[in-house]
Image (spheres, rainbow, N blue to C red):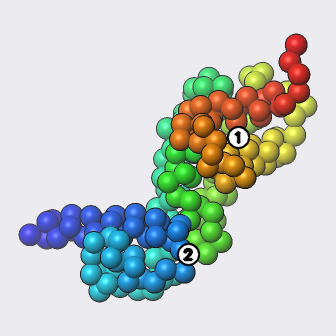
Amino acid sequence: MGRALRADAERSVRAILEAAEKVLAEDPGAPMEQIAEAAGVARTTVHRRFASRQALIEALATSAKQQLTDAIDDAHLDTAPPLVAMHRATANTLRVKGAWRFTLGNPLAQNDVAKEVWAELNARCLAFLARAQREGLLDPAADLEWTRRVYYALIGEALHGPGADEDPDAQNPDALATRIVDTLLHGAGRRG
């Protein structure tokens, strides 16, 4: 009986988090009651699982950041060929960030756990860029911190920049990843 309740509780938490992400992406000021309705649970269930709105937002941040970490892990940054790893990490990141628009872009969703995860992801990105540089994918003189910042900016613009919603590749993370990686590696200059 305890296991069934636990599984049921996990399902309700997952439903609440998914509903909260969707509702808050549309209206960051939406009340807990609206989130409960979207999740298909009673308001008291939301309050029982999350003592406050801030606790819910922190849980969203923790869940989103964990999914982003898992997506980066799936890219095999340490073992896959650098170009393959970069493309896969980019496509995976686009998928996760696209699904967590409120949480991964809202300052309210920042907490100590989220800050730790971001610090870890930044360090992993820099370590990967150093590997890509050693293996010849990046110029030996490239400033890796600048490269990381430009890479993140390209992802942000692809997801949230003007016209991003009208972009034909917006719904295709693999095609968008190809454009991002190509822009990062080759810029917009003439090729010849």
Residue 34 in sight here: yes
Give 72 or 46, whichever is nearer the viewer.
46
Secondary element at tag 2: loop
Residue at x-position 63% and y-position 45%: 166
Q: Residue at x 41, y 86 (%)?
A: 51
Give the quadrant of the N terminus. bottom left
How many marks the image carries: the answer is: 2
The reply to whether residue 13 is in sight is no
Residue 68: which numbered mark, if any?
A: none
The x and y percentages for residue 84 are 60, 25
Q: Which mark is residue 28?
A: 2
The answer to whether residue 9 is left or right of residue 181 is: left
- Amino acid carrying mark 1 in the image: Ala
Q: Amino acid at mark 2?
A: Pro
- Residue marked by disc 1: 127
Q: Is residue 34 above or below residue 121?
A: below
Tell which circle, 2 or 1, labels the residue nearer the N-terminal end.
Answer: 2
What residue is drawn where x is 49% and y is 80%? 30
Which image quarter: residue 136?
top right
Residue 165 location (% of width, % of height): 61, 49
Position of residue 33 measured from the top left corner of the image (x, y, whole percent): 38, 83
Badge 2 crowding class, 10 Å Cα cut-off, few under 14, some 14 to 19, many 20 or more, is some
Residue 188 drawn above or below residue 70: above
- Among the 4 quarters of the image, the one containing residue 130: top right
Q: Is residue 30 above or below residue 92?
A: below
Image quadrant occupied by the C terminus:
top right
Mark 1 falls on what kind of element? Answer: helix
Q: Nearer the viewer, mark 2 or mark 1?
A: 2
Image point 77% across, 34% down: which residue?
184
Is residue 19 rendered to the left or right of residue 108? left
Residue located farthest toward the left when viewing the structure as drawn: 1
